[in-house]
Amino acid sequence: MADKALAISAAVPGGRWSRLARLGSLAGGVAGNMLAEGARKFAQGKRPQLHQLLLTPANARRVANQLAQLRGAAMKVGQLLSMDAGELLPPDLADILSRLRADAIPMPMSQVVNVLDANWGEGWDRHFTQFSFTPTAAASIGQVHFGQRKDGRKLAVKIQYPGIRRSIDSDVDNVATLLRVSGLLPKSLDIKPLLDEAKKQLHDEADYRREGACMMQFSGLLAGADEFMVPEMHDDLTTENILAMTRLDGVALESLGDLPQAERDRIVGQLFRLLFREIFEFRLIQTDPNFANYRYASASRQLILLDFGATRAYPAALVDSYRQLIASAIDDDRQGMNAAAQAIGYFQDDIKENQRQAVLDIFALACEPLGSAGAYDFGRSDLGVRIRDAGMVLGMDRDFWHTPPADALFLHRKLGGLYLLAAKLKARVDVHGLASSYCLQ
């Protein structure tokens, strides 16, 4: 989320037909761009192929911009595709969809007032001595405003875009159809599991009372862990569509590259320790890997944890299988890895042996930092590239394609996001030492 106030705004289309019309105009715009690009290339004496006309920067920008304006499920599909599909997407589309992991276009003041009136009733300003109608951040399903209560407490108020909840399923289906029929996605890419999970996760995230409860649950679980701060929910102002919480100020983690090496190592080490506690101790994981879910309080050197909408509880049996998988990978025990992966749900009954070994190879790569004695240097490692390349080869094997359970997908996204952050901050972390107490008992 952004540090600066967002000045440009656009109303969120709330009705099903107005949202569908936006997607229809998007399809028409893509087609118009194709015709124009085709005419230009023919004028140059070229005979372009269809995919060359579809996958133009102009078309990719048009798709990304319209998804950002629709917000909600439409934007979430773009986020999931940009993070999960990775190098399977055409480079132009992947680059521009990656913008959807940052800020959305905020809604205008008039729409904000309508949402506040509907949830808090007229005269809601009696609770505040100050309320900023300019959002400080905007994301896929809501935007954040700052205010101050009459008792002096400073608040961050997350306001959900109107109509988001009822548009989730149709938005996801419509966007998937648009991307598929427009040719902007390769036919070999099976995105149905991602779409199903996008729907489920969005319905969870759209319930702000649920998110507030998860936030307070984490606050209790982390009581005594002074390295972290979690906002407090203001229950009297929280509804299904509005989450009111204590305002905690900090800077974006990805901006900490100039901090001393030791401090960067400490910060990333804390996040790895937190992840292991979430998996093996709490069995409750905040699965959204977005860097914006964390902030750094420079004065206290604490990490601020934000956005608990994607929190998922994990069954004990699945956690035990991951413990076995990690321990076996650290010991280079392929038989143990195979048994754990089978229990998690990675292998179909008719999987070929070379495919099975390819999956185990990827697990071994992903566990490389956990098996390395001493500090693992993420800044000097090409681990991300190696995992990507191995995954891309396997993902293009249509005889193999099999989607593991949703819990596994989201856990892998969380770990991958942490690896990306560690690489960005060039951190050196003894991941093996942190994991040992949980996986090598």
Image: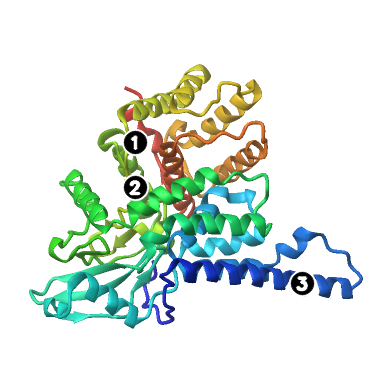
Q: Residue at label 1?
A: 434
Rendering quarter of residue 29: bottom right
Rendering quarter of residue 373: top left
Q: Nearer the viewer, mark 3 or mark 1?
A: 3
Q: Nearer the viewer, residue 436 or 121?
A: 121
- Which mark identifies residue 201? none
Instruction: Give the residue at x 66% y 56%.
Output: 181
Q: Residue at label 3?
A: 35
Residue type at mark 3? Leu
The correct choice, above or below, for 26 with respect to 129 in the image is above
Residue found at the very far right of the displayed protein: 45
Instruction: Give the residue at x 23% y 65%.
Output: 248
Position of residue 167 measured from the top left corner of the image (x, y, whole percent) = 42, 61
Residue type at mark 1? Leu
- State if disc 1 and disc 2 touch (CB < 8 Å): no
Rendering quarter of residue 185: bottom right
**Quick check: can you spot residue 146?**
no
Position of residue 207 measured from the top left corner of the image (x, y, whole percent) = 29, 56
